[in-house]
Image (cartoon, rainbow, N blue to C red):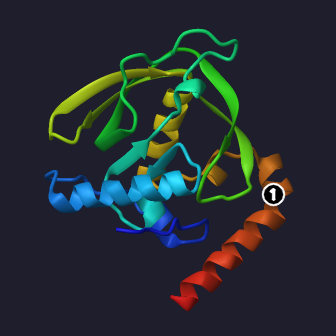
Amino acid sequence: MSFEIVTFGDPVLRVRATPVARITVEAKSLVDGMLDAMHAADGIGLAAQQVARTVSVCVIDIPAELDVAEEGGPPLNPGIQMPLVMFNPKITSRGDQAVRRDEGCLSFPGIHTAVQRSAEVEVSFVDWKGEVRVLRCCGLLARAVQHELDHLDGVLLVDRMSPVKKISMAGKLKRLREETAERRQGR
């Protein structure tokens, strides 16, 4: 299954995800297509809404060299296998520390903004085998989990921008919305 990543302005990005009732062959095929699309776009995370599906699934693939503290050192999330596939994910707890970092999004090509997120989160989800798992994540993985779960709730990068950033990006956002509308009309 081959997917095109939808961009800002496509209404599907605002749709809240519906839970996945069972892990079927079709759900696994969706995940394979999402991973292919994410890797082809050099991304580290992708939610179903970004490929015009409205089910609660996201994929994350943090390269080992990025799973370290800023000053280097050992992996921040040892033992967490990548790619990470999460059906029906929910954040069950957040750490006390919040960190503001630059963030991009495959649905907002060429646009980055500083976003404040919890430095550590605990996430509950259903894995490939249909088993409920709970992971404690920190660093870039925690940021990616929060970003993808935002997508599943219909929350976008633009919603996390400061008012000043929205004003400074208004032209780019308008152009992206117009390009998306033109592509949708051509479908």
Can you give x and y, in whole percent of width and height, for residue 170 in the image? 80, 62
Q: Amino acid at mark 1?
A: Met
The local crowd at label 1, few if under 14, some if 14 to 19, many if 20 or more residues have their Cα within 10 Å, is some
Confirm whether residue 78 shows in the render. yes
Residue found at the very far top of the displayed protein: 73
Q: Which residue is pictured at 33% across the width and 36% down the height?
A: 90
71 with respect to 168 (left or right): left
159 with respect to 32 (left or right): right
Can you give x and y, in whole percent of width and height, for residue 160 in the image? 64, 45
Of 67 and 100, nearer the camera is 67
Of 141 and 21, nearer the camera is 141
Q: Is residue 58 above or below residue 125?
A: below
Can you give x and y, in whole percent of width and height, for residue 51 in the image? 44, 64
Name the quadrant of the N terminus: bottom left
How many numbered discs, if any?
1
Judging by the rendered image, the residue that carries numbered circle 1 is 169
Confirm whether residue 153 shows in the render. no
Q: Which residue is pictured at 39% across the width and 38% down the height?
A: 83
Which type of secondary structure does the marked residue at label 1 adopt?
Answer: loop
Q: Which residue is pictured at 56% across the width and 22% down the height?
A: 139
Can you give x and y, in whole percent of width and height, for residue 98 in the image? 61, 21
Q: Which residue is pictured at 32% across the width and 41% down the height?
A: 86
Of 83 and 150, nearer the camera is 83
Which quadrant would residue 94 be assigned to in this image?
top left
Residue found at the very far right of the displayed protein: 168
89 with respect to 61 (left or right): left
Residue found at the very far bottom of the displayed protein: 186
Which quadrant would residue 172 be assigned to in this image?
bottom right
Of 73 and 185, nearer the camera is 73
